[in-house]
Image (cartoon, helix red, strand yellow):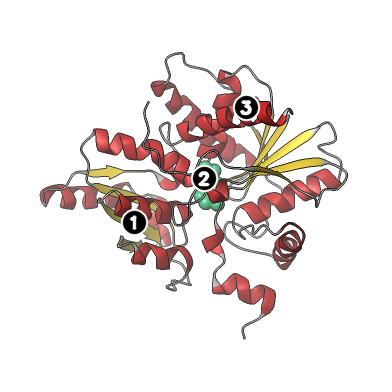
Amino acid sequence: MDKISIANLPTKIEKLDLFSNQSVFIKRDDQTGMVTSGNKVRKLEYLLKDAQNKGCDYLITSGGIQSNHARATAAIAAKYHMKSLLILKESEINKNEGNLFFNKLVGAEIKLVSEEEYQDLTPIIEEVKKELTDSGHKPYVIPMGGSNGIGALGYVEAYDEILHQEEQLGMVFDTIVIANGSGGTYAGLLYGNKECNKSKNIIGISVLNQKKQAAHDILHILEDMNQYKSSPNSFIENEINIIDRYIGLGYGKSQIEELKFIEKFAHEEGIILDPVYTGKAMYGLYHELKNGSLQNSQNVLFIHTGGIFGWTDEKINMLYGSI
Ligand SMILES: Cc1ncc(COP(=O)(O)O)c(C=O)c1O
């Protein structure tokens, strides 16, 4: 399957100093772009191509009020002279900040839905699709997080990119760690691992769902990916390695110790993690390394999947108070 080239690739791999007695590297997928940054862009390169192939002119997607995926979709729609409609879950804090602000700046239409409506978006999506079609548009629906069989192809490609970088660096990463949300990033990497006959330990640190649900979602995406591959692969739940000990207070909710860890990491590395995804995942990796559960890993690669716009006032005030 083809793609539209949008992201700045390959993204750099850098050594981290914080883990002095262990070899830990970071892959800077937070630098795939600016408003089109993070892991979502790799997925959207394939999804946009599919939308264009089908002659669509409207991108519809959904997510939380501060969805990184929705923001990247909106920015890409603007760049490719398409329209975008974002169906976002209302929260107590619907402020014009972070991702929501950038959505508006790039001209996305925003439809806020209640928490209850968000549980099953099918009727709402069908309704907006009909409205758009009746007014002469051709909408293309991208699932939450861009996580379907097409979107996940972006991370099969990222897996290949890592193999090339290993050759250049003269080293092998036996363990890859990412933040896991809707599962597309994990699914793409695991698919790449199998397709290339490798046995890297791919670890997803969940920020959203418990292990069982996360694995179920990933298996579903893996199955969907087979449609786009000439020789299909099969997967079982046991191959999926999700750690669900670092969800903390729940999706999008922060604890002060997580934010303090992000601050410590920024001081030592000059790299900014986000509070919703990569901050929790790196916090998790730090503790897993500390408690010895990854002692068989020689070289660990953490993929920084972006999310900087998640630093909303609420999170900043938790760390530093309001001025
Ligand atoms: C910054 C960031 N990291 C990681 C993820 C998780 O990716 P996935 O939804 O593919 O599991 C997301 C998804 O929203 C994200 O925005």
SS label for mark 3: helix
Q: Is residue 247 visible?
A: no
Question: Which residue extends farthest top?
Answer: 231
Give the residue number, with chain letter if any, for mark 1. Answer: 86
Marks 1 and 3, how far apart at CA: 35 Å
Q: Residue at x 22, y 46 (%)?
A: 57
Marks 3 and 2, how far apart at CA: 18 Å
Would you place residue 246 above or below residue 258 in this image? above
Q: Position of residue 157 (x, y in %)?
A: 51, 30
Residue 25 occupies which quadrant of the picture?
top right
Q: Nearer the viewer's eye, disc 1 or disc 3?
A: 3
Dot 1 or dot 3, earlier in sequence = 1
Q: Are marks 3 and 2 in contact (CB under 8 Å)?
A: no
Q: Are marks 1 and 3 in contact (CB under 8 Å)?
A: no
Would you place residue 94 above or below residue 253 in this image? below
Dot 2 amino acid type: Asn
Q: Nearer the viewer's eye, disc 2 or disc 1?
A: 2
